[in-house]
Image (cartoon, helix red, strand yellow):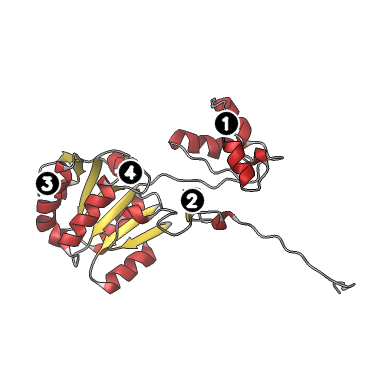
Amino acid sequence: MLREGIGKAGLPADAVILVEDISHETAVEVMQLTEYVDCLIPRGGPSLIQSILDNASVPVIIDGDGNCHVYVDVDADLSEAEEIVVNSKTNRPGVCNAAESLVVHEAVADAFLARIVPALESAGVELLGNEAACARQPMGVATDDDFGQEFLALKMTVAVVPTLDDAIAHITRFGSGHTEAIVTTSLDTARRFTREIDAAVVTVNASTRFTDGACFGFGAEIGISTQKLHARGPMGLRELTTYKYVVWGDGQIVS
């Protein structure tokens, strides 16, 4: 059926090939087929990504992990922030653009945690916090490993921080460069956050779940690159198109 569909699109029947042997050895062999493979986009867990980094000799675009954060600023609309955090975490917790960590400015932490903790827990989310978060609401204690973890499950870390500087530092330390979000009514704060956060996608007053090829209008998504060359963020066919220069002349030479 797949070959028939490809043929109807006017493409060669072997334009798509299924590799049925999914062993580690075969995967490594595919990574090294420089004569046949122009670009490899791995979709899988950390062990696959590490194998790619260790073994691949073909060009690779890493579809990286998503340790995504939502930062609730001192100037956030807390009702809006609650909706964004709940959606970012619970809409589809097993995907790379789900939020894994909540960062809250301490000036609004008492009020916001009092509403977001019950909302998340009622959705089945297990929360692990830093000392400042645990002092405000009952939750488990988070370690550095927890803050650096992509859970892909109903589990989330919570960090209460004193300043925007501390929020940016926390995200820079633990983020994976995938998607980071800020909730704020301050245009200056939003601009600084988008400027200083190094991620493929930064959202302002919107869910991390918008990092998606369909949401971006790219059609079918091929992956979400956390690299910087040459594609970054959600990738459709256009983002994977390369150049071919054709030079026409009538005898010109370079002096």
Q: Which residue is mark 2?
A: 220
Q: Residues within 10 Å of mark 2 (few under 14, many from 20)?
A: few
Q: Is residue 24 above or below residue 137?
A: above
Q: Inspect the image, locate mark 2, and give the three-letter code of the amino acid beneath it.
A: Ala
Q: Inspect the image, locate mark 4, and give the three-letter code of the amino acid beneath it.
A: Gly
Q: Is residue 121 above or below residue 178?
A: above
Q: Are marks 2 and 3 in contact (CB under 8 Å)?
A: no
Q: Are marks 4 and 3 in contact (CB under 8 Å)?
A: no
Residue at the spot x=66%, y=39% of the render?
A: 13
Q: Inspect the image, locate mark 1, and give the three-letter code of the amino acid beneath it.
A: Ala
Inter-mark Cα distance, 2 to 3: 36 Å
Of the image marks 1 and 2, the number of the one nearer the N terminus: 1
Q: Which residue is mark 4?
A: 148
Q: Which residue is mark 3?
A: 118
Residue at the spot x=62%, y=45% of the render?
A: 8
Q: Which mark is residue 27?
A: 1
Inter-mark Cα distance, 1 to 2: 24 Å
Q: Nearer the viewer, mark 1 or mark 2?
A: 2
Residue at the spot x=25%, y=45% of the render?
A: 90
Q: Residue furthest right?
A: 251
Left/right of residue 253 with respect to residue 230 in the rendered view: right
Q: Is residue 22 above or below residue 197?
A: above
Inter-mark Cα distance, 1 to 3: 44 Å
Of the image marks 1 and 3, the number of the one nearer the N terminus: 1
Q: Quadrant of the rendered structure where residue 254 is?
A: bottom right
Helix, strand or loop for disc 2: loop
Residue at the spot x=63%, y=40% of the render?
A: 57
Helix, strand or loop for disc 3: helix
